[in-house]
C-alpha cells in the first residue's frame, strides 16, 4: 500500500500530512489545546529530527567514561567515585564549547575545561553550584551527534535521592536509553526494576545495553559473558512481570528485549588507545565495533522514532477526538438545559415573590396602623390636663390662658410623638423591605452569569439604609398635629360654652384627624416604596430572562455547528486512523 520501507521520507511525509489535517480539525473545532500542542510538537520533531539518547544506570557503572570514549577524549569528569550531579547534554557543535543552563533561566558560557567546577559533587562548593544548574550543554564535533542526536549523561541511580530524582524526571523527555551495566556487578534487582520502568515509558522507543569494564573478563570468555548477561536481563525482567495483571507489559518487554542492542566495551582501554595510538589496545577495548554498531542503531532507530511517535500521536489524537467531541456536545446540552431550568426557577420564584410581597405589605401596614394607634394614648392625657384646668380655675381669663398653654403643649407633644412613630416606622419598614430584598437578591444573583458587570453591581447596590427611608419620609412630608377644633372657648362666648364638652370634641376630632393623616402618610410611603422596589426587581428579572435567552440561542447555534462538524470530521478522523494503522502494520511486518 505504501511501498518499500526503505523510503522513510515517504512515510514521514504521509504522517506529516495526517497530522496537519488533525491540527486543522482540532484548531477549527477549538478542541483541547493540550492535544493541539502534542500534535505540534511531533510536527516539529519531523522538521528537526532531534533524537535524545540518555546514558543511564547506577553509580560506579562508568557512564561518563563511556561518553568520553565516544567523544574520543576526556571531556566529562569521571572518577572512581560517583561525581556527576547534573544532566550533561552532548550535542553537535563545530567547536568544543560549554553552556551552563541554570534553573532560573540564566545561561553562562564557560571554558569546557572548567566543566568539573559545575557538574560534579567532588567538593561542597561544586555540589552547591550543581544544585542551581538545570543542565550543562556540551557542544562537540562528534560524528555520533552530527545527525541531530543528543547524548545525555545522567547522575547515577541509587547514589543520592536528589540525583536519582534528576535522572528519573529526565526520562520523560528522551527517545532512547543506553543502560550501562558493570561487568563487575552485572544487573541486580534495582537495575531490573529500572529497565521495567524504561519499558513502561511510552516515549522511549529504543533500549540498549552496554557492559562496561569488559577488560576485567578473560578475553576468551567475553562473548559468552555478554550472552549470559543478556539472558539474565531477559529472565529477571520476565520473572518480575510474570503476573496476570502485567500481561500486556510482559508482552511489550518481550518485544523490546527481543531485538535489543547489547555490547561489551572497556572505556578505559579505548581512551588509553586514543592517547597512545595503540591499535591493539583499541581492538581489545571492543570500542570500534561498539561505536559502529551504535551509530547504525541510532541512525535506523532515529527514523523509526519519528515514525513511531507520529503514529502514536495520530492514533491518540484520533481516540481523543472520539471522546472529547461527544463530551463537548453533552456539555453544551447541559448548559442549555441549565438555562431553561434557571429561567423556569426564576419564573416560579417570581410567583412566590409576589405572594411574599403582599405578605410583607400587609405586615408593614399592620405595623403602621399599630404604631399610629399609639397616638390615641395622648387623647386621655390631653383631656386629663384640660379637665384639671377647668376644675381648678374659676376665673375666666386665667382659665383661657391656661387652656392656651396646655393646647400648645399638647400640640408640641403630639408632633414629638409623631417623630417617635416615624423612627419606629422607619425601623419596621427597613427590616421588612430588606428581608424581602435579600431573598430576592439571592435568587437573582444565582443567575448573574446572564448579567453584565454593571447590572450585577446595580443589583448589589439595592441595599436600602435608614437614611434612604428617612429621606423618603421627608420628601413626603411628615404629618404635623393641628387642632381641628379649638379646645379654648372664645372669651365673649365663654359663658355659653360647655367647656368640658368643647374640650372633648376638640381632642377627639384633632387626634382622629392626626391619626388619619399618619395612616394616609404611612400607606403612601409604603405603596410608593413597594412599587419602586417591585419595578426595579421585575425590570432586572426581565433583563435576566432576555439575556439568558440570548445566551441560550448562542449555545444552540454553537451546538448545531459543533454537531455538524463532528459528524463531518468523524469521517476524516476514521480515514486518518485507518491509513495510519496500515502504516503501523507495514512497519511491524518489516521490523518484526
Image (cartoon, helix red, strand yellow):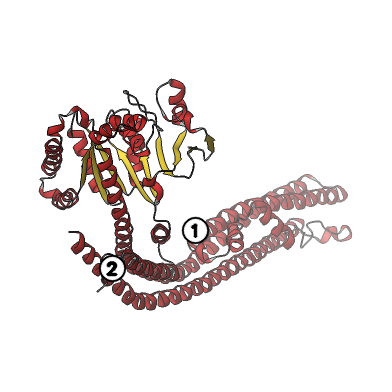
Q: Where is residue 242 shown, x and y percent of the image?
A: 10, 45
Label 1: few (<14), some (14–19) or many (≥20) C-alpha neighbours in 10 Å: few
Which quarter of the figure has residue 54?
top left
Residue at image point 28% right, 34% down:
279
- In the image, taking residue 62 as reference, residue 529 lies left or right, namely right
Asked if one can make out residue 477 in the rendered structure from this viewpoint, the answer is: no
Label 2: few (<14), some (14–19) or many (≥20) C-alpha neighbours in 10 Å: many
Q: Is residue 92 above or below residue 180?
A: below
Q: Is residue 190 above or below residue 335?
A: above
| Mark 1 and mark 2 residues within 8 Å of each other at the beta carbon | no
Residue at image point 85% right, 49% down:
401
- In the image, taking residue 257 as reference, residue 342 lies left or right, namely right
Q: CA distance from mark 1 to mark 2?
A: 55 Å
- In the image, taking residue 520 as reference, residue 541 lies left or right, namely left
Q: Nearer the viewer, residue 517 or 185?
A: 185
Which quarter of the figure has residue 64?
top left
Q: Nearer the viewer, residue 217 or 479?
A: 217
The disc, 1 or 2, on the residue closer to the chain's N-terminal end is: 1
Q: Where is residue 404 shown, x and y percent of the image?
A: 83, 51
**Which circle marks residue 339 in the picture?**
none
SS class, disc 2: helix
**Residue where numbered disc 1 is placed:** 442
Is the C terminus in the top left, top right, bottom left or bottom right quadrant? Answer: bottom left
Q: Nearer the viewer, mark 1 or mark 2?
A: 2
Q: Nearer the viewer, residue 314 or 50?
A: 50
Residue at the extreme top: 123
Q: Nearer the viewer, residue 477 or 123?
A: 123
Q: Where is residue 116 shown, x and y percent of the image?
A: 44, 27
Q: Where is residue 208 shown, x and y percent of the image?
A: 24, 44
SS class, disc 1: helix
**Residue where numbered disc 2 is placed:** 580
Asked if one can make out residue 570 in the rendered structure from this viewpoint, the answer is: yes
Amino acid at each position: 500500500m505504501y511501498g518499500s520501507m526503505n523510503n522513510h521520507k515517504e512515510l514521514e511525509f504521509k504522517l506529516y500530512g495526517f497530522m496537519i489535517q488533525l491540527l486543522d480539525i482540532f484548531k477549527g473545532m477549538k478542541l483541547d489545546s493540550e492535544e493541539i500542542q502534542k500534535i505540534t510538537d511531533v510536527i516539529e520533531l519531523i522538521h528537526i529530527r532531534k533524537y535524545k539518547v540518555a546514558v543511564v544506570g547506577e553509580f560506579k557503572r562508568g557512564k561518563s567514561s563511556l561518553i568520553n570514549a565516544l567523544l574520543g577524549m576526556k571531556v566529562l569528569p569521571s572518577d572512581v567515585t560517583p561525581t556527576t550531579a547534573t544532566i550533561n547534554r552532548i550535542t553537535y557543535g563545530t567547536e568544543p564549547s560549554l553552556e551552563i543552563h541554570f534553573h532560573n533561566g540564566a545561561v553562562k558560557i564557560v571554558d569546557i575545561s572548567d566543566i568539573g567546577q559545575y557538574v560534579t559533587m567532588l567538593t561542597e562548593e561544586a555540589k552547591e553550584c550543581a544544585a542551581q544548574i538545570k543542565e550543562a550543554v556540551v557542544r562537540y564535533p562528534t560524528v555520533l551527534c552530527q545527525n541531530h542526536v543528543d547524548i545525555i549523561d545522567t547522575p547515577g541511580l541509587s547514589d543520592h535521592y536528589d540525583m536519582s530524582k534528576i535522572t528519573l524526571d529526565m526520562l520523560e523527555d528522551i527517545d532512547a536509553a543506553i543502560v550501562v551495566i558493570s561487568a563487575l556487578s552485572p544487573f541486580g534487582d534495582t537495575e531490573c526494576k529500572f529497565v521495567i520502568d524504561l519499558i513502561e515509558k511510552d516515549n522511549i522507543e529504543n533500549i540498549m545495553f552496554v557492559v562496561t569494564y569488559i577488560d576485567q573478563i578473560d578475553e576468551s570468555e567475553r562473548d559468552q559473558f555478554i550472552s549470559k548477561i543478556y539472558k539474565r536481563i531477559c529472565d529477571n525482567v520476565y520473572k518480575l512481570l510474570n503476573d496476570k495483571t502485567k500481561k500486556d507489559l510482559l508482552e511489550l518487554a518481550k518485544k523490546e528485549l527481543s531485538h535489543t542492542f547489547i555490547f561489551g566495551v572497556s572505556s578505559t582501554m579505548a581512551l588509553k588507545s586514543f592517547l597512545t595510538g595503540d591499535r591493539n589496545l583499541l581492538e581489545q577495548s571492543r570500542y570500534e565495533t561498539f561505536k559502529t554498531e551504535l551509530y547504525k542503531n541510532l541512525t535506523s532507530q532515529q527514523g523509526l522514532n519519528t515514525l513511531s511517535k507520529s503514529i502514536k500521536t495520530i492514533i491518540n489524537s484520533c481516540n481523543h477526538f472520539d471522546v472529547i467531541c461527544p463530551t463537548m456536545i453533552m456539555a453544551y446540552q447541559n448548559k442549555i438545559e441549565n438555562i431553561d431550568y434557571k429561567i423556569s426557577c426564576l419564573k416560579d420564584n417570581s410567583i412566590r415573590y409576589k405572594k411574599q410581597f403582599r405578605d410583607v405589605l400587609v405586615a408593614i401596614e399592620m405595623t403602621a396602623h399599630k404604631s399610629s394607634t399609639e397616638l390615641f394614648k395622648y387623647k386621655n392625657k390631653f383631656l386629663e390636663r384640660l379637665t384639671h384646668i377647668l376644675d381648678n380655675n374659676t376665673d375666666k381669663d386665667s382659665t383661657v390662658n391656661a387652656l392656651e398653654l396646655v393646647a400648645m403643649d399638647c400640640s408640641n407633644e403630639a408632633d414629638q410623638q409623631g417623630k417617635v412613630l416615624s423612627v419606629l416606622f422607619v425601623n419596621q419598614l427597613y427590616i421588612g423591605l430588606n428581608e424581602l430584598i435579600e431573598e430576592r437578591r439571592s435568587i437573582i444573583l444565582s443567575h448573574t452569569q446572564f448579567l453584565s458587570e454593571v447590572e450585577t453591581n446595580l443589583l448589589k447596590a439595592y441595599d436600602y439604609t435608614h437614611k434612604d427611608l428617612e429621606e423618603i419620609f421627608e420628601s413626603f412630608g411628615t404629618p404635623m398635629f393641628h387642632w381641628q377644633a379649638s379646645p379654648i372657648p372664645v372669651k365673649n362666648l365663654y359663658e355659653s360654652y360647655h367647656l368640658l364638652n368643647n374640650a372633648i370634641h376638640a381632642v377627639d376630632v384633632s387626634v382622629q384627624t392626626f391619626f388619619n393623616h399618619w395612616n394616609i402618610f404611612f400607606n403612601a410611603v409604603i405603596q410608593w416604596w413597594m412599587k419602586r422596589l417591585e419595578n426595579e426587581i421585575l425590570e432586572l428579572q426581565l433583563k435576566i430572562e432576555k439575556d439568558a435567552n440570548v445566551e441560550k440561542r448562542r449555545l444552540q447555534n454553537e451546538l448545531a455547528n459543533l454537531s455538524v462538524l463532528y459528524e463531518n470530521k468523524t469521517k476524516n478522523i476514521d480515514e486518518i486512523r485507518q491509513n495510519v494503522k496500515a502504516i503501523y502494520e507495514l512497519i511491524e511486518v518489516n521490523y518484526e
